[in-house]
């Protein structure tokens, strides 16, 4: 089934579009102007975290993701036109040419995913006055803080990555997308989007466990999907809560501890003051950056990042990029 004939019916069912509804195979890109500086490559890598992420993809032409737009499953491709100082993005949707409502929907989702609507001028002024932070910030100037497109996807990522390496966590998430996410044939390859809560809610925990998840994680993912799809959990209502109130509300969900809740504060709600201390890679990166040799616990991390309040989350993203750069993934 291709991008041109995949339609999401009311309630999330996938079916064939009527013959007369099937759009042409190509569409012209549209442009987005974003505030400067902006670097798509750095932001996409901060979102992806690893090169084997199959949901958020990056290649020589730009960033790609499968998502539902205007009721159709489509691939959205984004590339940057010109340097970071230009602030111009070219966006292409597979399938029919985008209607104005489609373009507006895509801009809203990309604004969240790629953070291009966040004003970081205060952060750069702050960094310019700090001898330690300044070089780190300038080395990755143009990074914007990415967010998952939904809190459901953010929490699913947090649950999958608990107590395993990031490599294993991304592998599990790829399998989850392949098993339950919307799929397209694109340039001879089958690509998948992240599962909708309604789709995962229809699965049994044993099906999810068969992908390699632990029994506890499988049960937590299905329970979360069922609660969200049935309206028993209002994740959007967390936007107006304080950090501590949001952590308490999230902590009531199965499989969500303090680290997962703080991860959701940053990567789901965009709270840039939060440094997710439970991320072992982030803790280790912070220790290396500061020259601390002993393992860091929660209180130590909070004490160390207090110096850069309210930008602990920006420290987190910059240290992630530093690690990816050391591994040779960044140009």
Image: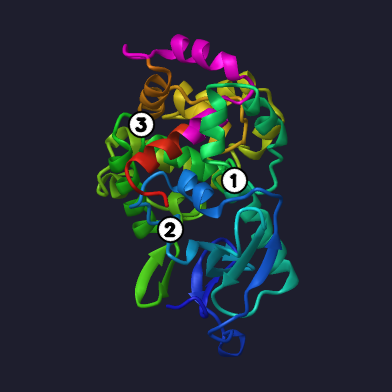
Principal secondary structure, stretch drawn in magenta: helix
Are there few (<14), some (14-19), or many (20+) residues within 10 Å of tag 1? Answer: many
| In the rendered image, the vertical position of residue 179 relative to residue 98, given as above or below | above
| In the rendered image, the vertical position of residue 306 relative to residue 52, given as above or below | above
Label 2, label 3: how many angstroms apart (C-alpha)?
A: 22 Å
Find residue 125 and report its horizontal and vertical position in percent: 69, 29
Check the picture and name the quadrant holding the N terminus.
Answer: bottom left
For the record, the magenta segment spans: 292-318
Find residue 211 and report its horizontal and vertical position in percent: 27, 49
Question: In front of the other: label 1 or label 2?
Answer: 1
Residue at 57% over, 28% down: 134
Residue on which the image places disc 2:
57
Quick one: 37 or 263, which is closer to the camera? 37
Mark number displayed over residue 142: 1
Taking the image as drawn, is residue 257 in sight? no
Between disc 2 and disc 3, whose residue precedes?
A: 2
Residue at 45% over, 24% down: 259
In the picture provided, is 247 more to the left or to the right than 321?
right
Between disc 1 and disc 3, whose residue precedes?
A: 1
Residue on which the image places disc 3:
162
Label 1, label 3: how many angstroms apart (C-alpha)?
A: 30 Å
Label 1, label 2: how many angstroms apart (C-alpha)?
A: 19 Å
Find residue 37 and report its horizontal and vertical position in percent: 65, 48
Secondary structure state at the residue bearing disc 2:
strand
Secondary structure state at the residue bearing disc 1:
loop
* Applied colour scheme: rainbow
């Amino acid at each position: 089934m291709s991008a041109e004939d995949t339609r999401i019916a009311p309630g999330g069912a996938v079916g064939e579009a009527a013959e007369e509804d099937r759009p042409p195979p190509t569409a012209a890109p549209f442009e987005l102007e974003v505030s400067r500086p902006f670097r798509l490559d750095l932001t996409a890598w901060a979102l992806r975290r690893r090169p084997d992420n199959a949901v958020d993809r990056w290649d020589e032409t730009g960033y790609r993701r499968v998502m539902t737009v205007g009721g159709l499953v489509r691939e959205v491709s984004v590339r940057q036109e010109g340097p970071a100082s230009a602030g111009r993005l070219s966006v292409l949707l597979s399938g029919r040419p985008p209607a104005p409502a489609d373009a507006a929907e895509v801009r809203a989702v990309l604004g969240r995913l790629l953070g291009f609507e966040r004003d970081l001028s205060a952060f750069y002024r702050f960094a310019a006055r700090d001898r330690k932070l300044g070089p780190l910030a300038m080395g990755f100037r143009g990074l914007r803080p990415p967010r998952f497109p939904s809190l459901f996807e953010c929490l699913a990522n947090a649950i999958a990555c608990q107590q395993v390496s990031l490599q294993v966590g991304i592998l599990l998430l790829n399998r989850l997308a392949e098993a339950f996410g919307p799929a397209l044939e694109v340039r001879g390859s089958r690509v998948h989007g992240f599962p909708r809560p309604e789709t995962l809610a229809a699965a049994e925990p044993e099906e999810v466990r068969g992908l390699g998840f632990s029994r506890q994680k499988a049960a937590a993912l299905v329970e979360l999907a069922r609660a969200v799809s049935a309206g028993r959990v209002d994740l959007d209502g967390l936007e107006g809560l304080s950090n501590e109130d949001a952590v308490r509300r999230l902590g009531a969900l199965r499989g969500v501890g303090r680290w997962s809740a703080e991860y959701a504060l940053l990567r789901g709600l965009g709270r840039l003051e939060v440094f997710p201390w439970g991320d072992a890679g982030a803790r280790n990166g912070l220790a290396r950056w500061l020259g601390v040799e002993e393992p860091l616990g929660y209180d130590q991390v909070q004490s160390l990042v207090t110096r850069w309040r309210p930008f602990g989350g920006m420290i987190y993203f910059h240290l992630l990029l530093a690690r990816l750069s050391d591994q040779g993934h960044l140009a």
